Structures are given as C-alpha cells and as structure tokens.
Image (spheres, rainbow, N blue to C red):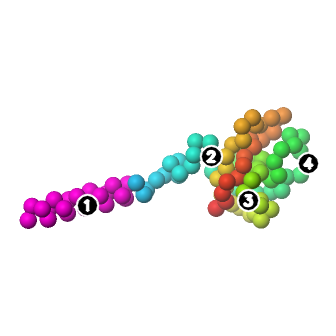
Amino acid sequence: MKIKNTTSKFLVFCLVLLAISCSKSKKDILSENQIEITGIIKAQGATTYQYGTHTIQENNVLYALTSTDLNLDNYLNKNKTIIATKKEGYPISGGPIYLNVDKIK
C-alpha cells in the first residue's frame, strides 16, 4: 500500500511540474529584443527618415516596419498584433523605432 501512495504522490508532483512549465507568460515567450504591438498596418510612403516599408502605430507611437520573412502587403489596413525585433542603430534622423516583423497574429 505504501508503494501505491508514493507512486500517486510522484505522479501528482510530475503533473504539477508539467502544468507550471506549460503556463508561460507573454514576456517569457518573447525574446529580450522583441516587442509586441497591436495596430493597423499601413503602407509607408515617402518619409524624411527613409527606412521601412510599412508602419504601425500604438498609443500614439509610430513604428517603421520591414520583414525578411513576411509579405506585409498581405496585412495592409488591417488591425493586427505583430511580434517584431528592434533593429539596432535606429531610430535615426528623428524617425520612428525600426522593427523587423517576425510574426503576425
């Protein structure tokens, strides 16, 4: 009987550990360099800062976007949440933060 009780406790302990390891917060999922932003993706026209192909705005902060993996034109004028990596060396010339979009939700 003692072996069965010990086995049950061990199984419960393993299930608790599994549940804890599977429940990660948003911050745990994003890398240190990534940012998550929700807004309307727009095509970028001529600008004074001359970088990025698209923009997104959240809380009155404008971000310039590009993507090495995604065609951002597929999301034009749509309200989306992006996960992006900040590009080093930006902003420049008074422009916005420059992001490479890794994923769109």
**Crowd rating for badge 1 (residues with CA inside 10 Å; few <14, some 14–19, many 20+):** few
First reached walking from the N terminus: tag 3 or tag 2:
2
* Residue 34, numbered circle: 2
Residue at screen point 50% across, 48% down: 28
In the picture, measured across the screen, residue 11 lies left or right of residue 63, that is left
- Which residue in the structure is indicated by mark 4? 46
The secondary structure type at the circle numbered 4 is: loop
- Which residue in the structure is indicated by mark 3? 70
Alpha-carbon distance for marks 3 and 2? 16 Å
Q: Nearer the viewer, mark 1 or mark 4?
A: 1
Alpha-carbon distance for marks 2 and 1? 36 Å
Return the x and y of residue 45 as percentages of the image width and height: 89, 52
Alpha-carbon distance for marks 4 and 2? 26 Å
Query: Which residues are the magenta region?
Result: 1-20
- Which residue in the structure is indicated by mark 1? 12
In the picture, measured across the screen, residue 34 lies left or right of residue 16, that is right
